[in-house]
Amino acid sequence: MTGWWKRNAPALVAIAVILPVGAYAVDTIEFGYVRNTPVRIAEGESYRVGDWIVGPVTIESLDADAVDAPPGTDPVVVTIRIDPGHDDFICQSPTIVDASSGRTWRSRTDLAWAPADDQLTYCASDTVVPYDIAHAILLSGGLGEHLDVVVPVSGDDQILDLRFVVSR
């Protein structure tokens, strides 16, 4: 190597390393987690992870004025039934995915909404009584008829994206 290539070799190596790492980081941060194994679950069905049962999942509309939602949006509450077991289990907040367009919406904490007294917003590992997890999500217009509610879970040495099919 001579001249320009020799002078710029460290920078070229740095670019060759930084670009793929940067693309991976942006994909992971912007578009979700590192890809977990997806499991598609039919509407109204549940799924067993170890000795825990997750589902079914429902989506119900909220009154936009009551939760201070911006005009033209559709606030909904996602409810996930959890039947706890004794194994280690972790779940994360749900994401709604429009099956026709791939658009996603995540849980919102800036709405004037609180779960019912018998609902939680997290997976509780200190109870053996079945419970519901509820999250408010703000949807935009132009949705398809079928939505997927994606719930990342880990348990029984598995890391999964449970994709519950829900119709509106």
Image: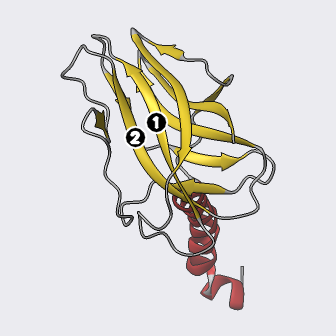
| Residue drawn at (46%, 31%) of the image | 80
Residue 15 in the image, given as x and y percentages of width and height: 61, 74
Q: Is residue 41 above or below residue 142?
A: above
Residue 27 found in image quarter: bottom right
Circle number at residue 131: none
Q: How many marks?
A: 2
Question: What is the three-letter code of the residue carrying label 2?
Answer: Ala
Q: Which residue is outermost to the left?
A: 126
Question: Is residue 92 something that shows in the picture?
Answer: no
The image quadrant where one finds the N terminus is bottom right
| Residue drawn at (57%, 35%) of the image | 36
Closer to the camera, 142 or 123? 142
Q: Is residue 9 above or below residue 98?
A: below
Tell me which numbered mark, 2 or 1, is placed earlier along the sequence. Answer: 1
Residue 165 in the image, given as x and y percentages of width and height: 67, 32
Q: Which residue is mark 1?
A: 79
Question: What is the three-letter code of the residue carrying label 1?
Answer: Thr
| Residue drawn at (39%, 22%) of the image | 82
Q: Is residue 96 above or below residue 42?
A: below
Q: Which residue is mark 2?
A: 134
